[in-house]
Image: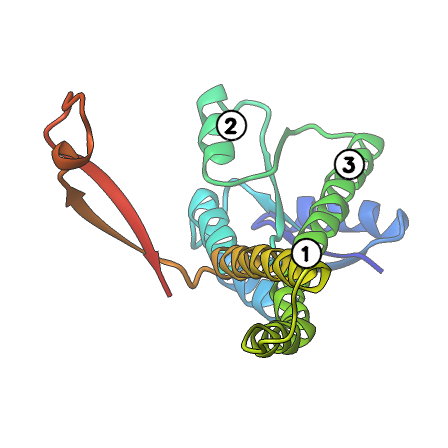
């Protein structure tokens, strides 16, 4: 079942919201303060935190920022709830602090449940995208190494054949074609390895100034910036 942490300093509002969500089939953990809410988030990593604007110990905006910073890699959705008298500026601040949704009281039971379900659909979609990205990165990291397994002995065999004096005519042409294609394949494998390193964040970029005047007949720019990569 989907876990929701309901953080509100007002006991009546907290319990009422919890009953509505539980009746809709959600698992709800209540917290009466920001510190209790943060502890519950760290212990259980819920799908959603419903966070009241007014808390007895931590500002709701600050708590939202902490949740988003702590769980950046495995996002926890945050829904902020405030009294209807709050200014629009409070909503803007909440959304800019990382909140995924903002509702103003009074909130009917159907509206609350529908809003929660909409956010959870977003959570599922984001998780699907993260998983797909992870599988793609794993595939790219494995593929060039697997390609090198048959590539290296083929290249070595061609180099060995190239040292023989016997091949001539059609055999020499076949050898040249195979050697050229193996060289091309080697560049593709190296490119895949570089792509894997970029995806894993292991590429280090080193910047240096390069004088282009000796190699450019136009000499429009005295210097330029070049970027080299190294592992």
Please tell me which of labels 1 and 3 falls first in the chain. Answer: 3
The C terminus, quarter of image: bottom left
Q: Which residue is at a point 18% across and 25% down the rendered structure image?
A: 217
Q: Nearer the viewer, residue 176 or 109?
A: 176
Q: Secondary structure at mark 2?
A: helix
Residue on which the image places disc 2? 91
Q: Which residue is mark 1?
A: 136
Q: Is residue 36 above or below residue 127?
A: below
Tell me if residue 104 can be seen.
Answer: yes
Residue 33 seen in the current view: no
Front position in the image: 144 or 88: 144
Instruction: Report crowding for label 3: few under 14, some 14 to 19, many 20 or more residues within 10 A (C-alpha).
Output: few
Q: Position of residue 193 (x, y in %)?
A: 53, 62
Residue at screen point 89% across, 47% down: 24
Q: Would you call the spot at circle 1 few (<14 residues within 10 Å), some (14-19), or many (20 or more)? A: some
Secondary structure under the numbered disc 3 in the rendered image: helix
Task: Please tell me which of labels 2 and 1 falls first in the chain.
Answer: 2
Residue 118's mark? Answer: 3
Tell me the distance, in whole angstroms, between the alpha carbons under discs 2 and 3. Answer: 19 Å
């Amino acid at each position: 079942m989907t876990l929701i942490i309901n953080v509100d300093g007002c006991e009546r509002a907290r319990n009422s919201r919890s009953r509505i969500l539980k009746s809709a089939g959600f698992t709800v953990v209540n917290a009466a303060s920001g510190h209790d809410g943060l502890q519950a988030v760290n212990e259980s990593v819920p799908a959603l935190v419903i966070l009241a604007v007014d808390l007895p110990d931590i500002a709701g905006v600050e708590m939202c920022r902490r949740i988003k910073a702590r769980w950046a890699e495995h996002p926890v959705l945050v829904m902020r709830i405030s009294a209807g008298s709050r200014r629009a500026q409070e909503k803007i601040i909440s959304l800019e602090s990382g909140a995924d949704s903002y509702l103003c009281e009074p909130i009917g039971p159907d509206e609350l449940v529908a809003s929660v379900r909409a956010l959870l659909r977003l959570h599922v979609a984001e998780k699907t995208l993260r998983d797909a990205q992870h599988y793609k990165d794993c595939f790219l990291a494995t593929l060039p190494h697997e390609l090198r397994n048959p590539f290296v002995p083929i290249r070595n065999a061609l180099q060995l054949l190239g040292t023989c004096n016997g091949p001539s005519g059609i055999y020499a042409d076949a050898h040249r074609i195979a050697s050229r294609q193996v060289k091309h394949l080697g560049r593709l494998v190296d490119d895949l390895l570089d792509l894997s390193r970029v995806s894993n964040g292991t590429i280090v970029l080193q910047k240096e100034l390069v004088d282009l005047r000796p190699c450019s007949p136009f000499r429009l720019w005295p210097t330029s910036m070049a970027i080299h990569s190294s592992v």
